[in-house]
Image: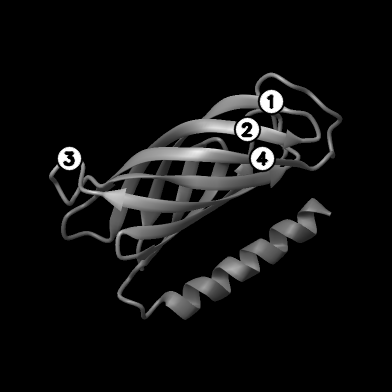
Amino acid sequence: MWKRAFVLIVITLALVSQSFASDNKKLGLGVVLGAPTGFSMKYWQGSVAYQGSIGAGFEGGLAIGFDYLMHSNAFNDRRFPFYYGPGLFMGDVGFAGPTWRRGDLALGVRAVFGVDYVLPDHPFDIAFELGPALLLTPVTGIGIEVGLAFRFYP
């Protein structure tokens, strides 16, 4: 089942990237290291962005996440926007603390806090984020997710 979901998501990301490719380079594609470690996508609309990720958790398994991010100029430097927002995640990944049978679908929510570094005159960004995550099913638990993303804006 997870192999089909992965293929479907990769195809969807490819189609989405093609449809947004001419939209002033607002779509970034790249990798994220942390929770999860895998692929990252970010689509900007002014000071708001939509972020998605798919990858493996620390203890294996597949994780898919989606975040709604609001950016502010908290550091008075447009190259370092601070961001925050809510997110959702699902998958059969391990989670620090509670345990459950491998293959059970986990669903949770998180709060994202981070900072982006937009490279001047280059189509790249680097982002560091962290935030509390609440696992809702199949068991309840809380943890902290940390990630470092590198994205290219074609």
Q: Is residue 150 left or right of residue 68?
A: left
Tell me the element at label 4.
strand
- For residue 23, the mark is none
Q: Is residue 24 left or right of residue 92?
A: left
Asked if residue 98 is positioned above or below residue 110 in the image, the reply reads above
**Cα separation between marks 2 and 3:** 29 Å
Tell me the element at label 2.
strand
Residue 80's quadrant in the figure?
Answer: top left
Q: Type of residue at label 4?
A: Gly
N-term-proximal mark, 3 vs 4: 3
Q: Type of residue at label 2?
A: Leu
Q: Can you identify the residue that label 1 sits on? A: 141
Q: Can you identify the residue that label 2 sits on? A: 134
Q: Is residue 63 visible?
A: no
Residue 123's quadrant in the figure?
Answer: bottom left
Q: Type of residue at label 3?
A: Phe
Q: Residues within 10 Å of mark 4 (few under 14, many from 20)?
A: some
- For residue 75, the mark is 3
